[in-house]
Image (tube, grey):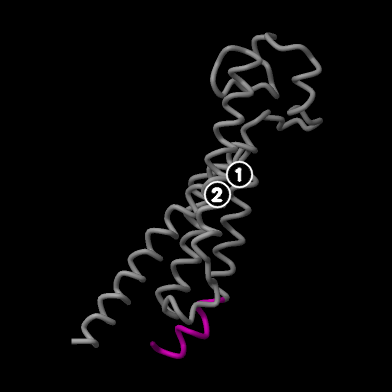
Amino acid sequence: MNPILKLFAFPVSFMMICLGVFTVLGGHITPGGGFQGGAMIAGGVILCIIVYGLKNSPIKFSHDFISAVESIGALGFVLLGLVGLFFSGFFLYNVGTDFYSILPQSIVNIFHYNDPTNTGIVPYLNVFIGLKVFVGLSAVVIAFAQFKRLEDHQEDEQ
């Protein structure tokens, strides 16, 4: 690989990851959100894997880390959905805003914060969706890179 690419790939991927985190955390009041931010974070990881290779990449994820983060993202999304289902009867009901005054105020106060841009559970959903998308897209590229490395190793043995 070209040394100029190696020189610029890690700082650029770091900036992509930071922009992705910013998009995830601000997605409830700006264009973007969990999916877009997660895709940007995964893009930074993928850039490092493509430029440095899987073995020498400065950003490395173990199988346990990938499965744990994906499980946290999925479990968090489902739990927030079940909170709405349990307290209002609707899956993913926005208990932080309670537009229809279904819930007692003590439950609403858990997810409600004093801010003119209060959106209830949407920021939390963005975080969980961002984790799920980031790990899902990164895992696909890591799997393809491992498959390519395994294929090259089998050709060397023959």
Q: Main secondary structure of the magenta part?
A: helix
Helix, strand or loop for disc 2 = helix
- The three-letter code of the residue at mark 2 reads Leu
Number of disc labels:
2
Question: Residue 12: x, y in percent?
Answer: 54, 72
Residue most extreme to the bottom? 3
Quickly name the residue at label 1. 127
Asked if the residues shown at circle 1 and circle 2 are in contact, with their CB atoms under 8 angstroms apart, the answer is yes
In the rendered structure, the answer to whether residue 94 lies left or right of residue 146 reads right
Helix, strand or loop for disc 1 = helix
Residue 76 colored magenta?
A: no
> Quadrant where the C terminus lies?
bottom left
- The three-letter code of the residue at mark 1 reads Val
Residue 6 lies, with reference to residue 89, above or below; the image says below
Residue 53 lies, with reference to residue 86, above or below; the image says below
Which of the labelled discs sits on residue 36, or is there none? none
Question: Residue 1: x, y in percent?
Answer: 38, 87
Residue most extreme to the left? 158
Residue 120 lies, with reference to residue 32, above or below; the image says above
Q: Residue at x 57, y 62 (%)?
A: 17
Quickly name the residue at label 2. 131
Asked whether the viewer can see residue 32, the reply is no
Q: CA distance from mark 1 to mark 2?
A: 6 Å
Segment tinted magenta in the rendering: 1-10
Asked whether the viewer can see residue 130, the reply is yes
Question: Residue 95: x, y in percent?
Answer: 67, 21
In front of the other: 91 or 123:
91
Q: Residue at x 45, y 90 (%)?
A: 3
* Callout 1 crowding tier (Cα within 10 Å): few <14, some 14–19, many ≥20: many
